[in-house]
Amino acid sequence: MNYLTCIIVDDEPLARKGIELNVKDVDWLKIAGQFPNALQAGDYLAEYDVDMMFLDIEMPGLRGLDFLKSLKKDVVVILTTAYPEFALEAFELEVFDYLVKPIRFERFYKSVSRARELIDLKKEGKTEFSDITEEYFYIKADRKYVKLYYKDVLWIKGLKDYVMIFTTGKRYMTAMNVKTIYSKLPHTVFARVSKSYVINVNTIESIDIDTIMIGKEEIPLGNSYKEEFLKTHIRGKLFKR
């Protein structure tokens, strides 16, 4: 079995223990280290490579989000926190997932399984991006071309040098950053709403101050993208009294 390695960074011993117990229930995931603060984790990552990092946000000294801003290592980051209000800032930093404590094992397992898909793709280099036409585009996955229609794409999430494309039936990964794929897609159909997200505007169900609902998914609406998004896609179609 091919194991993936992870580290746990949290100043609370009970929180570290909770994540440790969840990791032990995943037979392909192994703990390489546990650290009470970001500085010790940074020292470890300067010498060793790991696949995933479970990172708390509020810690004494260097906060988790500030640590992320200076992180140079290519590691999948899953934030673990008791504070849901940091989600928007976190996704602007291209974290893979955001787990709110207490973390149920079902939610934990779903997150690490998705992370494993990304890590496997990076290691194997299976997926690449192909051509875009007026109604659809292709991605190359598992030695075949997959045709994706614009109407079936719900949203696209950036993960550093990769994007995950969510459709009505499946999700796909391709080696391309958000900026590049957005530049190729029609802006009448797709809008970039944060550093990490592009959405199909036809799939929007509702918009709040800083979130967009597509089905059950809450997509963060970044402050630096909000004005252009509202002007281009909302205000001209808003019915007023």
Image (spheres, helix red, strand yellow):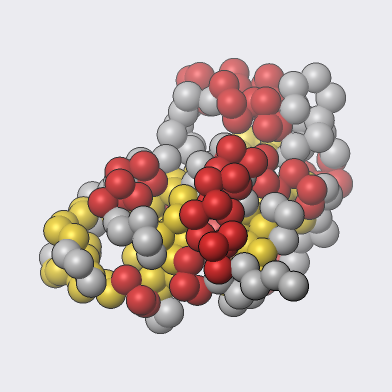
Instruction: Write the residue at 62% across / 68% down.
Output: 238
Q: Residue at x 58, y 54 (%)?
A: 230
Q: Quadrant of the C terminus?
A: bottom right
Residue nearest the observer in this picture, 27 or 167 = 167
185 or 228, nearer to the observer = 228
- In the depicted structure, whether residue 12 falls above or below residue 130: above
For this view, does 131 lie left or right of residue 196?
left
Whether residue 31 is visible to the viewer of this picture, yes or no, is no
- Of the 4 image quadrants, the one containing the N terminus is bottom left
Residue ranking furthest to the front: 241
Q: Is residue 229 above or below residue 10?
A: below
Is any part of residue 233 visible from this angle? yes
Query: Where residue 158 sits: x, y (%)?
Result: 44, 49
Which residue appears at 46% of the width and 28% of the height?
Answer: 73
Does 34 appear above or below 122? above
**Residue 109 horizontal/vertical position (percent):** 60, 65
